[in-house]
Image: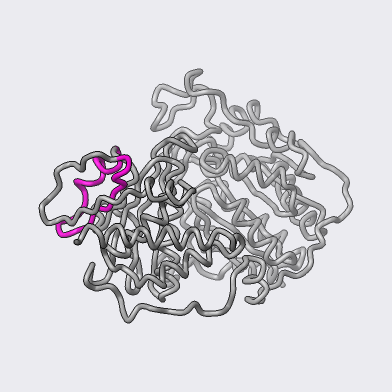
Amino acid sequence: MSKASVFYDKFERHSHGEGLKGHATHYCPGCGHGLAHKYLAEAIDELGIQDRTVAVSPVGCSVFLYYYFDVGNTQAAHGRAPVVALGHKFANPESIVVSYQGDGDLASIGLAETVATAQLGAPITVIFINNAIYGMTGGQMAPTTLMGQQSSTSPSGRNEYNGQPLKMAELIAGLDGPVYVERVALYDAKQRIKAKKAIQKAMKLQVEGKGYSFIEVLAECPTHLKMNPEDTEKWVKECMEPVYPLGVKKDLTVDPWFKRNAPCFKGEKILSLAGATSEHPERFCKGFPTHLAAHDISLKLAGSGGDGAQTAAMLIARAAISEGFDATHIPSYGPESRGGTSYADVHVAEEEVLNPGSPDPQVLIAFNAPSLAKFGPTVRKGGYVIYDSSVVSEAPALDPSIKVFPVPFTGIATDLGKAVVKNIVALGALQAATGIFPKDTLLGAIRTALKDKCALIPLNEEAFAWGIKSVEGLDK
């Protein structure tokens, strides 16, 4: 195997890999990424791990790694490459995983993932390209931008009000998880040899199952420094290196420890661990409730924290799924765990929920007056509003086409001896007012949710029944 086989023969992004452009790269002349790519490819080749290697590249100039390397490739959201790398490593313990990231990505939006993954210490390799700038997105100030250095977001130069540059190699070396941390550069032949050796060592430690390695590479970005490649190399040596001293920051001698059993992908076991079942629930709907909407029904449930709006929303979504429909439940909480605002958006779709938000719901269930006042006016014409008349003395003026159902959720639940079942009363009222599902569909969801608390099922069934009776009483 040669390193030529680790690299793709042509750069497909330009002219579909045809002609002279097929052999060009997307990197700017003098960019450090090319050398880092070369040393990584040589390490993969020399260690004979091409078929086991997975490269993770996120947002920024690093994202184009997959155009060059003939290895397993996966993309990650901005900053999330380390945790994506962990996913690959734990799902396939024999894989060799490389998280290849730039400074804006790794040290800014991805800092939490970077630190947490490093402290975990699982054997992955992180290659960190530090060129002191956001390269791809316009040359903004990065966490690694030097003091006094100009950028599009620090046109007068980075100053004390922007904070000091972040020294990632030292930060990572100070954690207990990593076994090897080194900072290297690319500005002359001597430093390039060191960079190659550091990357190879980091990869070898992973092959041996010894632990997490972090290689920081001081790299050139002539475009945003507005210099030619030679002057950029000089700038890295004279300006960057004093701030980011080169050398090994941590190098532990440890025994191999990462020896995980092969993962199991058997669906039955996963269902068992999740407390799920492969049995299909009994279905009671004859079809989608088109009397409410042709293909997608939106609901909003709102109240105070502790009112049970979130649980009721979850039960509606589960009931829909048990009938074979698509459903989503999006919770939203106030800052307080109890007593603050709490609302949920729920969608039930015949085939697929395209937007889980419910800014203009067809159905509103309000557990208190502020929720009714806030969301009542957003209900669509011809929609339904069901509210707790125990705590709301008067409903606000709504469109005449909206059907309003005042039901004493709290009063009924209190009479039953358990105020917390007011949300189940609300579900009974929902069923009677809208006919969204048959009674047995919602009762099935309630019973499933309470399968580990069977003693509570009769109380909840009674609360549900009283919710239905309360709405039926309004019709008389």
Figure quadrant of the C terminus: bottom left
Would you place residue 122 above or below residue 249 in this image? below
Nearer to us in this view, 322 or 62: 322
Q: Could you tell me residue 116's position as x and y percent?
A: 65, 43
Provide the residue span drawn in magenta. Answer: 370-391
Residue at the (45%, 70%) spot, across then down: 17
Q: Residue furthest left?
A: 400
Would you say 293 lies left or right of 351 here?
left
Residue at the (29%, 39%) spot, across then down: 369
Would you place residue 418 above or below residue 318 in this image? above
Nearer to us in this view, 389 or 356: 389
Residue at the (78%, 51%) spot, across then down: 211
Would you place residue 162 above or below residue 82 in this image? above
Magenta includes 385?
yes
Would you say 135 lies left or right of 168 here?
left
Would you say 127 lies left or right of 469 here?
right
Q: Could you tell me residue 36's position as x and y percent?
A: 62, 51
Would you say 75 lies left or right of 237 here?
left
Whether residue 60 is visible, yes or no, is: no
Residue at the (32%, 43%) spot, across then down: 390
Figure quadrant of the N terminus: bottom right
